Image (cartoon, rainbow, N blue to C red):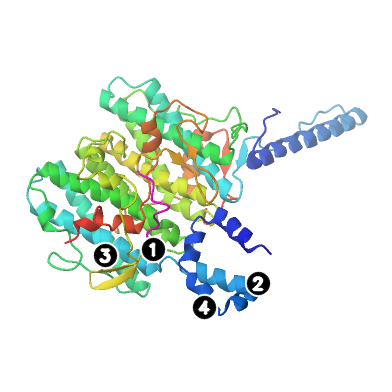
Amino acid sequence: MNFFNIIDLLAEADPDVLDRFSSRRAVFSSLGTVAQRAALATSPLFLGALFQKAYAGTASLPTDILNYALTLELLEADFYRQFLAAGQIPAGAATDAITVIKTHEDVHVDYLHKAVIAAGGTPVTGSATAGIRFNPSLLPATYADQLKYAQVLEDTGVRAYKGRAAELIGTDLLTPVLQIHSIEARHAAHIRTMRGQQPWVSLGDDLAADASYKAAYTSGVASSTKTVMALGGTTYGIPSYNPARPSPPESNLQQGAAGTKPAVLITTGIGSITYTADDAAAAFDEPLQAAEVLDSSRAGGLLA
Amino acid sequence: MSDHSFLPAWREQSLGRRVFLRVSAASAASVALIAAGCTDTTTTPTPADPYQLALPAGDSGLVYYAYLMALAQTTLYQKVVDAPPTDLTTAERAVFADLRDHEVVHKQTLGYLLDTTGATQLVPTDFAFNLTKFTLSTRAGVLAAAQQIADLVAAAYPVLLPLFTTSSVPQRTILLKMSSVQARQAAAVRDMLMPGSFANSDVVDSAGQLLTKTPTEVMTALAPYFAPYVISVASLAVPV
């Protein structure tokens, strides 16, 4: 039995498999002496135990993922509360749109709050004065600048949900989370239209070239070792940041990599060249790891 | 019978047609024999429906399903780009050019997932998304058609994605990346037809979640436009 061959085969099916093992290195050391481990490693029982540990809710529990989503929704909801309260939004269509979006964020908060409790966890909380909330000192003075934050929050929300969806496979939570993810994308498209930008993330976006905001559209974080977030009155786990595989930037033109399977260059690799690189990038929204989203360079930096 | 090299689903289908042809030829021959031996009445064999297309089971069926939706979108958006109604503004035409390009990317990518060589014909040569039921000569007609299709596809993805088995990581990931772009497209189209309607209550429920459509509902909605072909989603993973 070639143990490493099995790992290679698994890696093709599940690119995260090595992360699962590295985060479970304790499994190996818990098995006693080197001699015992060598003997055990040839045993199917050992493999069974190893994989059970590696795959048994390794990354995070559903309550962790829900609390992560709830963190972002609380941040968004409080941002829109402050945005509306600042009184800079033109009356009519603009105020109506922001009000609709605020309403959606509020009901997302409500849904996720109840979902955490239903899953047996303690939901993170936030209000205008405590817990998870948008840092009021960051709210810009003008409507135009406030709207930039809205775009960054919505685009980041889309990337954040996308980054955790795979962990909810096989649970009843996946579909509702994808339904919320879809609504965040509609919000993002509308905010972008309000700003005179393309509704989709485009290489020509003004904020993608703006030093203050471009982190939302790039890849990776300088350094992050966080695996536990203590926020809003409780703590929840997040997967440790994998610097070897940062999330693709939104300008990514290569898709389909998994394990040892190489990515395909969308501009030339799929049999049609009637579209531009901008189209090839805009046709896909990219995910973000939790550690990237919660980093101070992105949504984490907007928390009070 | 053409000699197209179909992928499993369509090969099954074309095999079905081939089997049908063989059977019907045999029965025609036996009818002819009987006719020659007994009477001079002629009997026409009842043909199996050559336009019945079944999506394959498993993950490739889900990719096919997405491919057919992308095919519908590219056909519609290409037509608008090729023959825009006179009252469609320059800015709106640019949006439709982007919609067309994004959906060409999606369609090509999904086709690549089904067959990396590009040599396989994914649908029969006479298979098409028929636009004649839409009114594409006016801005209102174009936007109504685009909203209908864009909302339908956006509503399909949150149901489609969880149906993938855990082994199909690249496929699932790529479709996940497309799903929010579908949502952006639907919002953009809605905002053109009725500004501010990007997430109206006809597409969002009271919990702020997108109202979704199952593969059966989506294919029923698209059926008039794929006729005479009839797409069966019965083999897809439940719930279809």
Residue at mark 1: A239
Nearest the viewer among A272 and B78 is A272
Q: CA distance from mark 1 to mark 3?
A: 25 Å
For the residues labelled 1 and 3, say whether their Cβ atoms are less than 8 Å apart: no
Q: CA distance from mark 4 to mark 2?
A: 17 Å
Taking the spot 38% from the left edge, 62% from the top edge, the residue there is: A240
Q: Chain of mark 3?
A: A
Q: Secondary structure at mark 4?
A: loop
Q: CA distance from mark 4 to mark 3?
A: 42 Å
For the residues labelled 4 and 3, say whether their Cβ atoms are less than 8 Å apart: no
Nearest the viewer among B44 and A201 is A201
Q: Is residue A241 magenta?
A: yes
Taking the spot 34% from the left edge, 58% from the top edge, the residue there is: A290
> Residue A175: x percent and y percent?
42, 57
Q: Secondary structure at mark 2?
A: helix
Residue at mark 3: A110
Residue at mark 2: A44
- Kind of residue at badge 1: Pro
Upstream in the sequence, badge 1 or badge 4?
4
Residue count near mark 1 (Cα–Cα under 10 Å), binned few <14, some 14–19, many ≥20: many
Task: Indicate which disc residue A2 carries.
Answer: none
Q: CA distance from mark 2 to mark 1?
A: 28 Å
Q: CA distance from mark 1 to mark 4?
A: 22 Å
> Residue B112: x percent and y percent?
54, 37
Foreground label between 4 and 2: 4
Q: Secondary structure at mark 1?
A: loop
Q: Main secondary structure of the magenta part?
A: loop
